[in-house]
């Protein structure tokens, strides 16, 4: 028994001894990461490298900035690295743990003192900012934080010199226009090329992107940087890079905001009483002008003068003026003229505009291991329009994966999005149709035209359309018993009814994505294959109910309900092969790129409209009516490209980049299928020279120059080949009828090619006082040649014009960026300012340099493109004031009416006085 006890005791001691020995062989590290102020640096990453086995362990700090890593081998040196975006990485090398030790570390990170090591995305790769020799503007994720923006283009507003972002309307989700260093084309597209995670997209609207997913936006401004995109680079290139995962446990980020938007400025309009007085004065003036012209005619033809008075009744006014209804005084204004209180006095701007809610909620997760990293996000964005019954909703997701195994690196980026829009005809004229051809009436213009005398609703709660029937509803009985209808008032529909009763719903789906595999074939040489897709589809359904009455009709009878349906589907795919060689030997750094790219776009769509046959307004779809018109379309384009680039630096002091791209496009003539777009740029970092190295005030100074050529292929498909269209022809005979056929409507041009832009850029980048002050200046001169213009051709060809490459435009200007980053104790602040100036001039046009004239937005206004002036210069009469009296009219050039009108419309006191050209 004693023997058994002894055996068990020895066994227990052995187990305890082994356990103690095992425990003694492992250790742990705890610690905290703080910023320069001593505050915990939430989101910092800790990576431990076992220098013997090269095994890595990674972890993210907790919300208190603390971390704990257990199970570490004792007696083994570790490299401990702490990092955070915007801060300098700190590494503790060869940290040796003792057996059983529980080490506690305090790691303090300081803000990155310089942005020179920042990585800037360029076409088909990236460069350190200090090595960039071209004009590239960049913003990072930190520049987008805490901003209520719903579009990546909004993020660029005011942040990039030489990049102009404008919004044509306040429509929720509306596309923004981006112009890079002016406009260099007249008839081809002027939008930049958008590239998302390396995939050039063909649909320019980037409102499907969750701005919280964006890691950086770069704009390639000069031709040298954009030449790598060849025939699509003339208008600049916008590179959007999304966030990727990072080593460590998942970092969860939640972004949420809610806000309200309202109209910034109302147009000052008359109230109902002022409107009534103005109407009376205008009718009296119209009556007096008409009678004066009639009496001048009577005097010239020997007829007696007609006596008149502004107190004449409407019946007498019509008799005297020859039934001029614009001289009639509407009876509805009389109570207002008499000062009666409590009458309808509607402010139509207040009725259509509202305080609108905007909200955005997104969540993302980023993390992973050394072999697989991930970034995933979900987003919901909702923006109500400031006009009633309008809005924009976006649902989007993202999954970015990046993995490594052996010599391979691979990745997938997928971004699905769903958009729902409630659109309105907000910008059209009060009597104009919408984009689908339905006569909807512009809501804002209708509000400005609609009289304040009328209410929004009738007594029974239905919408009032009194102004629509105002003129046809006024009947004046003449002394002879006959009647005249009309009072000359403008027809308009109730703008609130237009907003609330009509439907224009758009649903859009988009899937953008890419996948790649990269293999390191040999040391420093990598082959990469990438497949990208951009699939877009949308469906738009509109409905105009019959309750919106027939235009300008007494009694406001019901109209025919109208509906339309439009569908669009676009598929764009890209396949690219690239070889990258990167080598450092001594003081020399060399990077070379070779690539081949194929891209194809397929666009199809259908449109149908029903303008009659609806039984009820309750069924708001095309199928409930009789389809009266429709069309369908399908078109494709393709692009094949070869790419080459070399980047070289010596001691990071002398820099050179050269590239060339060859593009073959289906859009151009058989004699010009291929175009070649070279570029070269050089840089010299003077701050690395001995004579400036000790200059304390100068942290960095680089001068650079670039020259490159780009193209613009943004023209309709098939114009080079010629195009056919449908025609109808009536054959005679016993039973004549229309026979459908087809005939050419555009002449083919085998020599048609892209517009070419050649741009010279010189500039410098400087940083002062330990990078606390930065300055970048660029000056450029850009010439666009072979403009695509329609020029007259002999009618014997069967055509009146032909699209040809002819003409030249010059853009030159300067971009300046100034920035500063300061820190006072715990207070950090940054500020930036930029300035840009562009001068645009047309150098050559078509035969004889004939002006290109298009009508403007208002009467007597024109957009004029003329040699020596900017593209599309806006011309309209310049108002100097009004004529105070007849003597002033007689002494100044003024409008003279035709002789047969007896000066009815000749300028008179009170009329505008225009500058004599």
Image (cartoon, rainbow, N blue to C red):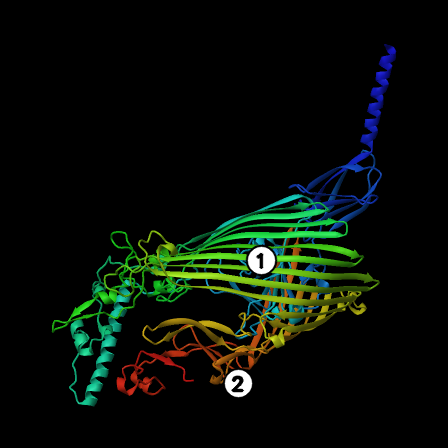
> Mark 2 packing: few (<14 Cα in 10 Å), some, or many (20+)?
few
Callout 1 secondary element: strand
Give x and y (percent) for residue 761.
66, 73
Nearer-the-camera pick, 889 or 786: 786
Q: Which residue reaches farthest left?
A: 480
In this figure, what is the number of numbered marks?
2
Give x and y (percent) for residue 83.
71, 49
Callout 2 secondary element: helix
Task: Tell me the quarter of the image containing the N terminus.
Answer: top right
- From the image, tell me which residue sits under label 1: 534
Nearer-the-camera pick, 431 or 332: 431
Nearer-the-camera pick, 698 or 452: 452
Q: Is residue 592 visible?
A: yes
Quadrant of the rendered image containing residue 98: top right
- From the image, tell me which residue sits under label 2: 847
Compared to residue 748, the image places residue 104 above or below, namely above
Q: Which residue reaches farthest right?
A: 3
Give x and y (percent) for residue 43.
66, 46
Compared to residue 776, the image places residue 296 above or below, namely below
Label whose residue precedes the other's in the sequence (1 or 2) = 1
Q: Which mark is residue 180?
A: none
In this rendering, position of residue 363 left or right of residue 405: left
Q: Residue at x 61, y 48 (%)?
A: 376
Task: Tell me the quarter of the image containing the C terminus.
Answer: bottom left
In this rendering, position of residue 78 left or right of residue 315: right
Q: Residue at x 55, y 74 (%)?
A: 721
Give x and y (percent) for residue 81.
75, 47
């Amino acid at each position: 028994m004693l023997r058994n006890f002894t055996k068990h005791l020895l066994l227990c001691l052995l187990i305890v001894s082994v356990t103690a020995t095992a425990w003694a062989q492992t250790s742990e590290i705890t610690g905290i990461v703080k910023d320069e102020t001593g505050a915990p640096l939430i989101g910092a990453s800790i990576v431990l490298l076992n220098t013997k086995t090269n095994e890595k362990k990674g972890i993210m700090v907790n919300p208190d900035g603390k971390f704990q890593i257990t199970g570490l081998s004792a007696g083994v040196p570790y490299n401990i690295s702490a990092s955070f975006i915007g801060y300098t990485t700190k590494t503790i090398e060869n940290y040796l743990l003792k057996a059983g030790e529980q080490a506690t570390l305090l790691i303090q990170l300081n803000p990155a003192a310089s942005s020179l090591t920042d990585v800037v995305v360029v076409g088909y790769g990236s460069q350190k900012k200090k090595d960039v020799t071209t004009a590239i503007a960049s913003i990072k994720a930190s520049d987008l934080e805490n901003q209520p923006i719903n579009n990546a283009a909004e993020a660029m507003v005011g942040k990039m010199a030489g990049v102009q972002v404008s919004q044509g309307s306040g429509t929720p989700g509306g596309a923004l226009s981006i112009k890079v260093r002016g406009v260099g084309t007249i008839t081809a597209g002027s939008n930049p090329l958008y590239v998302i995670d390396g995939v050039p997209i063909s649909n320019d609207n980037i409102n499907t992107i969750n701005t919280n997913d964006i890691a950086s936006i770069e704009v390639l401004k000069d031709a040298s940087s954009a030449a790598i995109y060849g025939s699509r680079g003339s208008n600049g290139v916008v590179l959007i890079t999304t966030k990727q995962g990072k080593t460590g446990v998942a970092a969860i980020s939640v972004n949420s905001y809610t806000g309200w938007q309202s109209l910034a400025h109302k147009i000052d309009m008359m109230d109902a009483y002022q409107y009534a007085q103005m109407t009376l004065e205008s009718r009296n003036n119209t009556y007096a002008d008409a009678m004066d012209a009639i009496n001048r005619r009577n005097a010239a033809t020997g007829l007696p003068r007609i006596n008149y008075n502004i107190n004449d009744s409407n019946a007498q006014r019509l008799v005297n003026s020859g039934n001029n209804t614009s001289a009639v005084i509407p009876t509805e204004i009389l109570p207002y003229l008499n000062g009666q209180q409590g009458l309808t006095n509607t402010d139509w701007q207040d009725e259509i505009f509202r305080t609108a809610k905007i909200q955005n909620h997104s969540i993302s997760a980023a993390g992973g291991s050394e072999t697989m990293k991930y970034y995933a996000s979900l987003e919901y964005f909702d923006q109500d329009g400031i006009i009633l019954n309008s809005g924009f909703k976006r649902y989007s997701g993202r999954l970015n994966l990046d993995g490594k195994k052996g010599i391979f690196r691979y990745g997938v980026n997928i971004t699905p999005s769903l958009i729902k829009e409630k659109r309105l005809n907000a910008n059209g004229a009060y009597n104009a149709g919408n984009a689908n051809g339905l006569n909807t009436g512009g809501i804002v213009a209708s509000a400005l035209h609609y009289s304040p005398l009328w209410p929004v609703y009738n007594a029974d709660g239905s919408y009032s359309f009194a102004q629509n029937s105002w003129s046809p509803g006024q009947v004046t009985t003449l002394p002879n018993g006959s009647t005249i209808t009309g009072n000359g008032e403008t027809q308009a529909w109730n703008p609130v009814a237009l907003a609330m009763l009509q439907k224009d719903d758009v649903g859009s789906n988009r899937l953008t994505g890419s996948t790649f595999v990269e293999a390191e074939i040999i040391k420093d040489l990598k082959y990469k294959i990438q497949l990208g897709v951009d699939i877009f589809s949308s469906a738009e359904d509109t409905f105009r109910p019959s309750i919106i009455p027939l235009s300008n009709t007494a009694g406001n009878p019901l109209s025919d309900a109208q509906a339309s349906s439009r569908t669009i589907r676009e598929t764009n795919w890209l396949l690219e092969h690239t070889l990258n060689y990167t080598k450092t030997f001594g003081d020399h750094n060399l990077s070379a790129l070779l690539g081949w790219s194929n891209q194809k776009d397929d666009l199809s769509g259908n449109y149908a409209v029903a303008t009659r046959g609806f039984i009820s307004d309750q069924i708001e779809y095309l199928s409930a009516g009789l389809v009266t018109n429709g069309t369908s379309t399908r078109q494709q384009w393709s692009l094949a490209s070869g790419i080459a680039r070399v980047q070289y630096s010596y001691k990071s002091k002398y820099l050179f980049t050269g590239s060339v791209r060859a593009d073959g496009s289906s859009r151009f003539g058989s004699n010009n299928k291929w175009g070649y777009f070279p570029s070269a740029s050089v840089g010299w970092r003077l701050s690395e020279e001995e004579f400036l190295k000790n200059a304390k005030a100068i942290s960095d100074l680089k001068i650079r120059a670039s020259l490159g050529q780009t193209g613009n292929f943004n023209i309709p498909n098939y114009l080079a080949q010629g195009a056919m269209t449908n025609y109808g022809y009536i054959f005679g005979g016993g039973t004549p009828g229309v026979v459908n056929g087809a005939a050419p409507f555009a002449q083919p041009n085998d020599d048609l090619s892209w517009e070419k832009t050649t741009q010279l850029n010189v500039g410098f980048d400087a940083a002062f006082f330990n990078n606390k002050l930065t300055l970048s200046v660029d000056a450029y001169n850009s010439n666009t040649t072979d403009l695509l213009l329609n020029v007259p051709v002999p009618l014997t060809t069967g055509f009146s014009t032909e699209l040809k490459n002819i003409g030249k435009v010059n853009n030159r200007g300067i971009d300046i960026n100034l920035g500063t980053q300061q820190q006072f104790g715990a207070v950090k602040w940054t500020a930036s300012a930029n300035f840009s100036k562009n001068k645009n001039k047309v150098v050559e046009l078509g035969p004889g340099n004939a002006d290109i004239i298009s009508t403007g937005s208002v009467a007597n206004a024109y957009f004029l493109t003329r040699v020596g002036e900017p593209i599309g210069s806006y011309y309209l009469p310049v108002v100097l004031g009004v004529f105070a009296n007849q003597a002033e009219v007689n002494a100044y050039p003024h409008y003279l009416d035709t002789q047969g009108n007896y000066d009815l419309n000749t300028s008179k006191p009170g009329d505008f006085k225009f500058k004599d050209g």
